[in-house]
Amino acid sequence: MDPFQIYSIPIRGLNTGLHHYDFEIGEDFFRLFEASPIREGGFHVAMDLDKQQDLSTVLFSIKGWMRDSCDRCLADIRLPITSSYSAILKKGEGDDIDPDLIVISEEAHEWNVAHLIYDYICLSIPFRKTIDCKKLSPSPCDQEILKKIQNYGPSEDNSVWDVLKDF
C-alpha cells in the first residue's frame, strides 16, 4: 500500500465550495523522505480547499514543533513552528513557472498533497533555531555555554589594526 494514500484528496467527485481537511504529521511521515531535515516532531496541518469550476484556492495552516539543537547554546530544544501558505489549483495541461500555481491533469481523480505538505513544513523551519529560554521553566538551554557567550567579546588589544588608523 502507498504510504502517501491518506494524503490524497478526491478531486473529481468534489462539489464546488469550501472543503476542510486535517492531517497529523509525525516522524513516520518524515522518514518517507530521503535526507529530511526533520527527524523528530509533530505537526497539525489544516487544509482549506475552495473548489471552483476552473481555479481553486488552497490554504495550508501549519502548527507544530520539531526537535533540534539550539543554534545559540547547542542544547536539545523543542522548536515551535507556525506558518501558513496559499496556492491556486488549476486543471489543465503543462507546467507553469509560478510556484503558487499547481496544475493538475483534467483526467485526475485525486490530488496527493503529501509532497506539498512536506515542502511547506520544511520551508517553515526558521533560519536561526533558537527559543526564548527565559520564558520556559525549566529552561532547556545550556546556561554554562550562555555565560561563556556573554563573557566573550572583542579584545581591547587590537594593536595589529592600530597601524591603519594613521592612514
Image (spheres, helix red, strand yellow):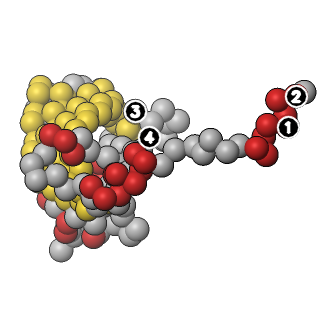
Indicate the position of residue 21 as horizontal and vertical percent values.
Answer: 10, 42
Q: Amino acid at mark 2?
A: Asp
Q: Amino acid at mark 4?
A: Glu
Q: Are marks 2 and 4 in contact (CB under 8 Å)?
A: no
Mark 4 or mark 1, whichever is nearer to me: 1
Q: Amino acid at mark 1?
A: Val
Q: Amino acid at mark 3?
A: Asp
The mark that comes first in sequence, 2 or 4, is 4
Q: Residue furthest bottom?
A: 1
Q: Residue at x 29, y 31 (%)?
A: 86
Q: Residue at x 35, y 57 (%)?
A: 145
Q: CA distance from mark 4 to mark 1?
A: 67 Å
The mark that comes first in sequence, 3 or 4, is 4
Mark 2 or mark 4, whichever is nearer to me: 2
Q: CA distance from mark 2 to mark 4?
A: 68 Å
For mark 2, give the secondary structure: helix
In the image, residue 20 sits, relative to residue 120, either above or below, namely above
For mark 4, give the secondary structure: loop
**Observer-nearest residue: 131 or 59?**
131
Question: Which disc number belongs to residue 163?
Answer: 1
* Horizontal side, residue 47 vs residue 119: left or right: left
Residue under pointer 4:
93
Residue under pointer 3:
100
For mark 1, give the secondary structure: helix
Quarter of the rendering occupied by the C terminus:
top right
Residue under pointer 2:
166
